[in-house]
């Protein structure tokens, strides 16, 4: 078991990621992945197995963030069940299939995925910055079902391959392609993240790894690290959601852009390791 000081550090990181995940609707995986990677660095020699281990534990935490944030969204009546279930349901299918494909493979290199991920995200962020507000227009428009399913499918693949939850792709796609207001996109993303992560976390909890990091472990899920962070996420995510309702759409868009730049840097240069 980690020492008390380590548990407190995990709790603090959970609080930070809960605020980020609830505010931006992205799940907080950009905090979970580097923290888990750094703490279990001694096992990095296991290659692709270690990458899958980090992804599985990160997705458990993004699931907690999604559930907690969505509960708050429902309570403040900023929840869109039809869109959320369409995106999350399709994402759950592709996330599970991708997770299965990643088991026992040697071809998956996170560096290669980081490049593809960046090439996909950069133009979306640029268009998010350049676009005008669609808030008044979107209040009367329903999302295109085919586009919602495509957003879910792509987000599920990104979620399973990166451990980031899929929100980093989902939010800009919903905002740019479907012209959703940023706050609506963040709400849908939180709910969809919870649905997508539930299937992959169930899969990872049933795996029998070739190595263990702790006696307190269920499948690939390392409880000494994820449980204290999960407590922090549960406590902080609702406040992140509330904060998102207070700030202006323009201010929230600025935070989105800064956050996505941070994600790109972390994916390509591991700035927090």
Image: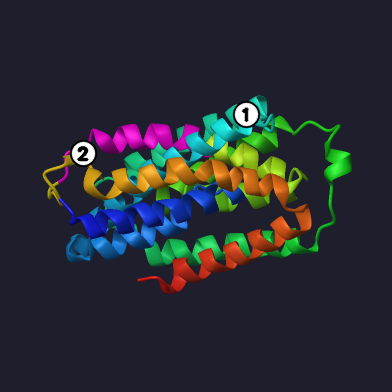
**Magenta segment:** 193-209
Q: Which mark is residue 219?
A: 2
Q: Is residue 76 above or below residue 117?
A: above
Q: Residue at x 71, y 48 (%)?
A: 246
**x, y percent for residue 119:** 58, 65
SS at badge 1 = helix
- Tell whether 103 sits left or right of 216: right
Answer above or below: position of 235 versus 258.
Answer: above
Q: Position of residue 87 (x, y in %)?
A: 59, 34
Residue 207, magenta (yes or no): yes
User: In which quadrant is the C terminus drawn?
Assistant: bottom left
144, above or below 99, in the image: above
What x and y, as percent, mark residue 31? 43, 58
- Apparent side of residue 53 relative to residue 193 in the rendered image (left or right): left
Can see residue 25? no
User: In which quarter of the view is residue 143 placed?
Assistant: top right
Q: Earlier in the sequence, mark 1 or mark 2?
A: 1
Q: Residues within 10 Å of mark 2 (few under 14, many from 20)?
A: some
Quarter assignment of residue 149: top right
The residue wearing badge 1 is 75
Marks 1 and 2, how far apart in space?
34 Å
């Amino acid at each position: 078991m980690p020492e008390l000081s380590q548990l407190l550090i995990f709790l603090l990181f959970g609080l930070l990621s809960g605020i980020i995940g609830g505010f931006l609707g992205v799940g907080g995986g950009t905090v979970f992945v580097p923290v888990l990677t750094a703490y279990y660095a001694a096992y990095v020699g296991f290659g692709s197995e270690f990458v899958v281990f980090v992804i599985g534990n990160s997705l458990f935490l993004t699931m907690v963030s999604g559930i907690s944030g969505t509960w708050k969204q429902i309570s403040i009546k900023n929840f869109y069940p039809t869109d959320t279930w369409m995106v999350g349901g399709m994402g759950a299918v592709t996330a599970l299939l991708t997770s299965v494909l990643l088991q026992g493979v040697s071809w998956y290199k996170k560096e290669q995925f980081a490049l593809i991920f960046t090439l996909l995200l950069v133009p979306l962020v640029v268009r998010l910055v350049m676009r005008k507000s669609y808030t008044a227009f979107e209040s009367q428009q329903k999302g295109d079902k085919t586009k919602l399913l495509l957003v879910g499918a792509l987000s599920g693949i990104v979620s399973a391959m990166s451990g980031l939850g899929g929100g980093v792709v989902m939010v800009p796609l919903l905002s740019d392609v479907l012209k959703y207001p940023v706050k609506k996109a963040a709400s849908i993303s939180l709910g969809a993240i919870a649905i997508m992560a539930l299937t992959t976390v169930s899969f990872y909890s049933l795996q029998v790894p070739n190595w263990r990091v702790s006696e307190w472990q269920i499948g690939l899920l390392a409880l000494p690290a994820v449980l204290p962070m999960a407590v922090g996420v549960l406590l902080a995510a609702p406040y992140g959601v509330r904060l998102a309702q207070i700030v202006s759409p323009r201010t929230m868009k600025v935070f989105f852009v800064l956050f996505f730049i941070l994600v790109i840097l972390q994916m390509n240069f591991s700035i927090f390791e």
